[in-house]
Image (cartoon, grey):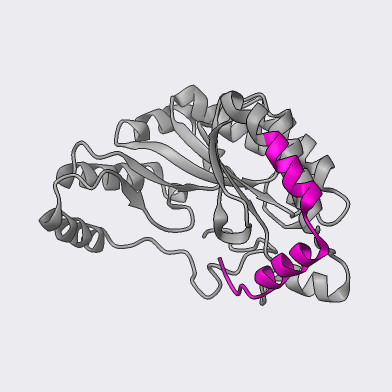
Amino acid sequence: CTHNSCTFCNFYHGYPFRMAPLEQVEADLQEARRYTDDPGRIWASGGNPYAMSTERLAELGRLFKKYFPNTPLATYARVDDLNRKTVEEMQYLRDFGWDDLVIGIESGDDDVLRHVNKGYTAADILEGCRRLEQAGVRYRVIYLGGLAGKGHGIETAHRTAVLLNQLHPYYLFLTTVSVLPGTELYEERARGEFVEMGERERLDELITLLDKMKNDIRVFQVPNTTWITFDIDLQKEKADVLPQLRRIRDETTDEDEARMQAYRDSMTGV
């Protein structure tokens, strides 16, 4: 990851950003080609490969098409990667296959983005994603619940819904934060400067976000840090899902809270 400074993340600690040599990429493609002529999708791995220069990405796109001419291509991008490229550059790269980006916006709340040192604002998210839309590039976003801390879940969900209602991602991944050892957020929690949301408030945050979103979008609640998972067409299924989530919230016991907290505390990375 070119940023590698978010206070909640330890995933790339000790791994400085670098570009894989083209020879290495081609060798991987040659190996994959021995097993299949269409893997279904190519995922360009790394924290945010879209940070690379336009010409480097075009060169990689040509290489992917050489071995898998009809296979869709996807990768991660940071918001500041989007704002360093023009709409014309995005359109150019789309023609080389870069037409499905996953963006971890985490939140649409400037207070949260600033606190966790994401390196951009809600206005930057709006600008970057609108550029993608102008360029005709499809994109998915990730929302990381719980980042606002205790007492702020509903407010941050409202602010994020206001942002997302101005955009058109085709997919939303929902997850919720675990405070991981070795992160700045872990140290803040130890000093009492960050107090985690309980499970009921995390559910209130989730319910509020889904309730206020007007997007025609697919939503997937990722199961790695929560006991609830679903994959829904939001506008078609919202009326069925929200009552179920409210019931789960109302039936969540103190024992449930403690069990989920213990599970999250057992995690050392995601």
* Residue 234 percent across, percent down from the top left: 59, 30
Q: Which residues are magenta?
A: 242-270
Q: Quadrant of residue 146?
A: bottom right
Residue located at (67% from left, 68% from top) = 264
Up/down of 245 relative to 49, above or below: above
Using residue 191 as the reference point, say whether residue 187 is left or right of it: left
Q: Main secondary structure of the magenta part?
A: helix
Up/down of 162 relative to 109, above or below: above
Residue located at (73% from left, 39% from top) = 207
Is residue 219 among the parts visible in the rendering?
Answer: yes
Using residue 256 as the reference point, say whether residue 124 is left or right of it: left
* Residue 3 percent across, percent down from the top left: 58, 59
Q: Quadrant of the C terminus?
A: bottom right
Using residue 119 as the reference point, say whether residue 269 is left or right of it: left
Up/down of 234 relative to 201, above or below: above
Magenta region includes residue 1: no
Using residue 56 as the reference point, say whether residue 86 is left or right of it: right
Residue located at (16% from left, 47% from top) = 67
Q: Quadrant of residue 80?
A: top right
Magenta region includes residue 254: yes
Q: Quadrant of residue 235?
A: top right
The tally of labels here is 0
Residue reaching furthest to the left: 34
* Residue 221 percent across, percent down from the top left: 58, 46
Residue located at (85% from left, 64% from top) = 195
